[in-house]
């Protein structure tokens, strides 16, 4: 529960920073590196949450009961969020390295001016 609430709050803060373009005013902060570290940390924390939730599902309990359904759902959704943060970590790693480019920069770099 701590992992989910804490990372949700931090994600909202990062979203607000990018929504209001405050990252442009805080130019001294290396934002691609900060986002990569955040996403990798969130992925690691959600891996532990996924393992914990999966271990809490008791295979000997009845599959239609409420505790089984709640633990199985928590395990499933923590796996989905872990994958989402993992993909985001991959893309933020590419942005940090400068691998990706958009259509405008690739056209200008190709001599189509």
Image (cartoon, rainbow, N blue to C red):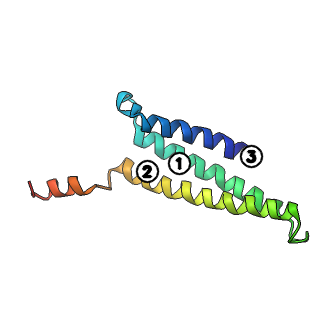
Image coords of residue 71 (percent x, y): 80, 60
Q: Position of residue 89 (x, y in %)?
A: 49, 53
Residue 42 falls left or right of residue 2: left
Q: Disc 2 on helix, strand or loop?
A: helix
Q: Do the residues labelled 2 and 1 touch (CB within 8 Å)?
A: yes
Q: In this figure, which residue is indicated by the disc labeled 1?
A: 39
Going 17% across and 57% down the picture, which residue do you hit? 107
Q: Which mark is residue 1?
A: 3
Q: Residue 24, how many percent across, how many down?
A: 35, 32
Left or right of residue 112, residue 15 in this image: right
Looking at the image, which is closer to me, 96 or 81?
Answer: 81
| Residue located at (51% from left, 44% from top) | 37
Mark 1 touches mark 3? (CB < 8 Å): no
Q: What element carries label 3?
A: loop
Q: In this view, does 32 lie above or below 26?
A: below
The residue indicated by pointer 2 is 92
* Depth check, front residue: 79 or 68: 68
Marks 1 and 3: which is nearer the front?
Answer: 3
Q: In percent of the image, x 74 and y 58: which residue is there?
A: 74
Which comes sooner in the sequence, label 2 or label 1?
1
């Amino acid at each position: 529960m701590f992992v989910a609430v804490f990372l949700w709050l931090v994600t909202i803060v990062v979203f607000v920073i990018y929504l209001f373009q405050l990252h442009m005013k805080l130019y001294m902060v290396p934002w691609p590196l900060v986002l990569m570290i955040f996403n990798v940390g969130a992925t690691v924390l959600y891996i532990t949450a996924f393992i914990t939730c999966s271990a809490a599902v008791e295979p000997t309990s009845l599959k239609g009961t409420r505790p089984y359904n709640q633990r199985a759902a928590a395990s499933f959704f923590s796996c989905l969020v872990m994958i989402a943060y993992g993909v985001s970590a991959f893309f933020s790693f590419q942005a940090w390295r400068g691998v990706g480019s958009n259509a405008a920069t690739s056209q200008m770099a190709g001599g189509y001016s």
